[in-house]
Amino acid sequence: MFKKILIANRGEIALRVICACKELGIKAVAIYSEADRNSLHVRFADEAICIGPPRLSDSYLNIPAVISASEIANVDAIHPGYGLLSENANFAEVCQSCGIKFIGPPPEVTRLMGEKEKARATMKKVGVPILPGSDGIIASADEAQEWARTIGFPVIVKASAGGGGRGMRIIRSNDELPNLFHAAQSEAAAAFGNGDLYMEKFIERPRHIEFQVLADEHGNVISLGERECSIQRRHQKLVEESPSVVVSQELRERINGILVKSLSELGYMNAGTIEFLMDEEHELHFIEMNTRIQVEHPVTELVTDVDLVKSQIMIAAGMKRVGHGRGLGEVADHDCGGHEDERGHPPSRGVARTRHGVPHQRRASRALHAIGGKDYGAEPAGRDGHTGGHCGLCGGRDSAVL
């Protein structure tokens, strides 16, 4: 087992990993920017190292600074959390070359799944159902028109290099295709440094279903069932629940079997989430895979009684850590945070001045803490608006949602 782990993240997920480390008897090292000097993850860790100024590119996304902190602290492994460097295959390769274990999948798998159109082709090859769409990147608006005629309107173009709704456009007719294609291309290039697009059939009234998987380094893979995250705002998930009310036991078992087989063939390791869209015939179609822990992981933890973060660490340490979870009830997760207003102003939560307790069989994850015994703080400018989440485990769906 590892003796010391550096958490290459901040806020809520950094706290979550620190808690897992403490329960496993592992020393936790936090990194922080100058803006996060008083953050709770810094105060809770066994050691903390400042890695730069507030700008993310100069601190949390600065790979040399993160690696330098790891070497100063003499850690065995790095847990990337979610966001930031968590799906950066280059960072995982640098960790390997420095003799530091990256707690996540192999970099070649991360790189493959990070290129969405290649992920589609790979999953199709190993038997995972996908939406009708283009074969790879679309080079021009003319080619896009050819694919749209083949697939049938409406269609959607998506950025190959990213997600979160950026570089994405719904196209309902041939006349509007050129302008929307170029708009998506420009947005993707600005957001991800890569304007490559691919096309899929657009589902008018989809349900968004994601399956949680764990895979150890001995070839064992398990699917821990689904979370439904159909309630979203601007392609950002707001509410998740498990199990989904629209996934039958037969469909659940079929998809679980497909995922176990396909991920074994791919040589996947550690935690991952496979996202699907459900059409009006209740068929599931693969859209992407997240090769990291998700914000919504507590939903699966509560409903299966499997600690995903501790499992990540134990898998990375070479342990056989794939066991079946058990269904404990219904769980709903409500994400909390600031959002842009209708005019596009960036999110700001202001200062939280009160905090309420959490009832039995409910779980709150947050990064807010009291400052000087008075306020619970405000997020530094330029950060994600996510404050935390509130999960409820109950015997029925209505109670869980409430």
Image: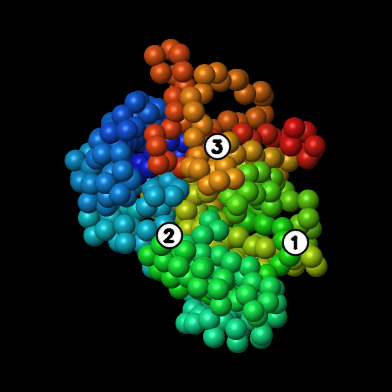
Report, in whole angstroms, how far the alpha carbon at label 3 lies from the one at label 2. 22 Å
Of 217 and 205, nearer the camera is 205
Left or right of 234, for residue 373: left
Q: Which residue position is annotated with label 3?
A: 337
In this view, the mark in front (2 or 1): 2
Residue 170 rendering spot, x and y as whole percentages: 63, 68
Distance from the alpha carbon under mark 2 to that under mark 1 = 27 Å
Image point (60%, 76%), residue name: 177
- Locate residue 207, reporting x and y percent: 72, 58
Give the labeled residue for mark 2: 191
Which residue is farthest top? 373
- Quick one: 106 or 368, which is closer to the camera? 368
Looking at the rendered image, the quarter that the N terminus falls into is top left
The secondary structure type at the circle numbered 1 is: loop
Q: Give, as a three-letter code, the residue at label 3.
A: Gly
Residue 315, how many percent across, how many down? 44, 51
Dot label at residue 53: none
From the viewer's perspective, tell me whether residue 269 is left or right of residue 241.
Answer: left
Quarter in which the C terminus is drawn: top right
Left or right: where 259 falls relative to 11: right
Give amino acid for label 1. Answer: Arg
- Helix or strand or loop: what does disc 2 sit on? helix
Instruction: Indicate the position of residue 208 as horizontal and vertical percent values.
Output: 67, 57
Task: For the residues labelled 2 and 1, say whether their Cβ atoms are less than 8 Å apart.
Answer: no
Among the two numbered marks 1 and 3 on one chain, the one whose residue lies closer to the N terminus:
1
Q: Which residue is mark 1?
A: 205
Disc nearer the start of the sequence (3/2) = 2
* Residue 130 visible somewhere in the drawing: no
